[in-house]
Image (cartoon, rainbow, N blue to C red):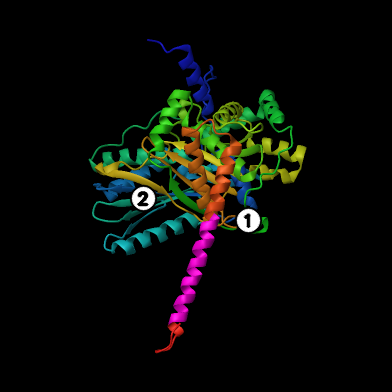
Amino acid sequence: MSPSPERLKLLAKLLRERGIETSARAATIPPRESPGEAPLSHDQRRLWFLDRLDPGTSLYNDCITLHVAQAELDPPAFRAALEELVRRHETLRTSIVADRGEPVQHIAAAIELPFREVDLSGSEPDERDSALARLEREEATRPFPLDTAPLWRATLVRLDARDWALVLTMHHIVSDGVSYAVFAGELSRLHDAFAAGQTAPPPPERVSYGDFAAWQRARADAGPDAAKLAHWQEVFAREVPALELPYDGTRANAGQTGAMLFFRLPDELVPRLREVCRREGRTSNQLLLASWFALLASLGHTQDIVTCIPNSARDRVELEQVIGFFVRTIALRVDLSGDPTLEELVKRVAGSSTDACANGDVPFEEVARLVRVEQGLEREQAFRHWFAHMRDVVRPLTLGGGRGSYRFVDGGHARFDLSLIVDETETSVKAFFEYDAGLFQRETIERFARHWTETVRRLLHEPKTRLSLLREGLEASTRSEATGLKRARRDARLHDLQRVRRKSVQPGETT
């Protein structure tokens, strides 16, 4: 039975949101002329430029720990699997060098494997956990010189006889969230084959990242898409108002350190999220993104908000299994005027995000330039917030018959003033705020997490709630929390004072 027109329309809409073309396309990406080098992709150029402004930074390190329990891991097979992975993926042998002043990707024929093994199995549990945390922090904060390959490293940690952790750190210029899934999946399959004495399974059909970058550059050299550029000129024709959040610090303290706050939505909200998506014909990304806009509107008291979101450039089948940086940054602007209900807000966010993703291959720098030229350099404050939603993007190791899990490592930095990253699986919705510690105290971010959770709950259970009513409820909650905190601090001071007085009373005296 063929799908109905309504289902085909919904499928096309979902594909457009992910940046996947549904119309007929030109021939597949051709191989580039020079196999040893390639131009930088649009987004690689942006990261390279930022690195030149602040050399020696670990700001764009991405670190994740892949844990596998009860696994029959074979260390020699694991190392052989890594070596095969390096042979298959150019980005694992890539550095960024200047050629006559122009940055290019240099792909080495071979590299020294950036791999080491650490054995913590003889340590006590508390000591072992502390040692692993120190190792994670060291790996996350150690910079990569972009002109020296490779731009990744891996540490295999033995925690117990059959428990292992792989601390994997990659510079964002050669990776993205999907890359970690490709890395973990392919590494698991290769390890199991080698451990069983078999040959390596054949790789999937795909092109190299360098071929993609060369193809993208050729399209850009042909000139910008006038219609897509006109879309962004219309979006940013109006002045972008400042979004002033309840900062604890001043702008002078920004950009020095960052932190992450991990939390999760209550389990009972997960099936409700699935139910609402099915009933309303929405994606969980649309609903959770709308909740982010609702939170920013409540905190910043503005009706016109811009936030940055990612959009995947993996819009072809041959790019799905490639390790590389395919994330395009999109500036999403949503009008929240008229005191809409949360239900109406979802419609506005869905419409705006669909249009933005359909025009998402205009480089972010072009969009930022429009704001700078039309509204002044200071308007770049419009691009200080980020929301990312991942649905089964990162995958755990599955090697050796073990149970896999993963966690993101806090590298002590923040790429934006405030970011919310949502990691959704079939059974849970985990999230973390990455925030500038010079602007926000941790207790403020904890309050934001509670407020976002309440916003999601309202959206799922009380979608007719208007933004003004949501804001009033969150503000009342903030006042109540502040009153409770003051009372707790006062009681603690009284307790301390009484304790000091009791200690100062001499025998036979009374207080």
Secondary structure mostly seen in the magenta stretch: helix
Question: Mark 2 or mark 1, which has the lower sequence index?
Answer: 2
Residue located at (58% from left, 34% from top): 466
Q: Is residue 190 above or below residue 150?
A: above
The reply to whether residue 509 is in sight is yes
**Position in image of residue 193 (x %, y %):** 27, 38
Q: Residue 445 lies in magenta, yes or no?
A: no
The foreground one among 22 and 80 is: 22
Rounded to the nearest angstrom, the CA distance separating label 2 from label 1 is 32 Å
Where disc 2 sits, the SS reads strand
Q: Is residue 108 above or below residue 440?
A: above
Q: Residue 494 lies in magenta, yes or no?
A: yes
The foreground one among 58 and 309 is: 309
Residue density around tag 1, few if under 14, some if 14–19, many if 20 or more, within 10 Å: some
- Where, by quadrant of the figure, is residue 178 drawn? top left
The amino acid type of the residue labelled 2 equals Leu
The amino acid type of the residue labelled 1 equals Ala
The reply to whether residue 223 is in sight is no
Residue 254: give its label.
1
242 sits to left or right of 296: right
**Position in image of residue 265 (x %, y %):** 43, 42
Quarter in which the N terminus is drawn = top left
- Residue corresponding to mark 2: 166
Residue located at (23% from left, 47% from top): 72
CB within 8 Å, label 2 to label 1: no
Residue density around tag 2, few if under 14, some if 14–19, many if 20 or more, within 10 Å: many
Where disc 1 sits, the SS reads loop
**Position in image of residue 487 (x %, y %):** 51, 62
**Position in image of residue 483 (x %, y %):** 54, 57
Q: How many numbered marks appear?
A: 2
Please provide the residue range marked out in magenta.
482-502
The foreground one among 423 and 304 is: 304
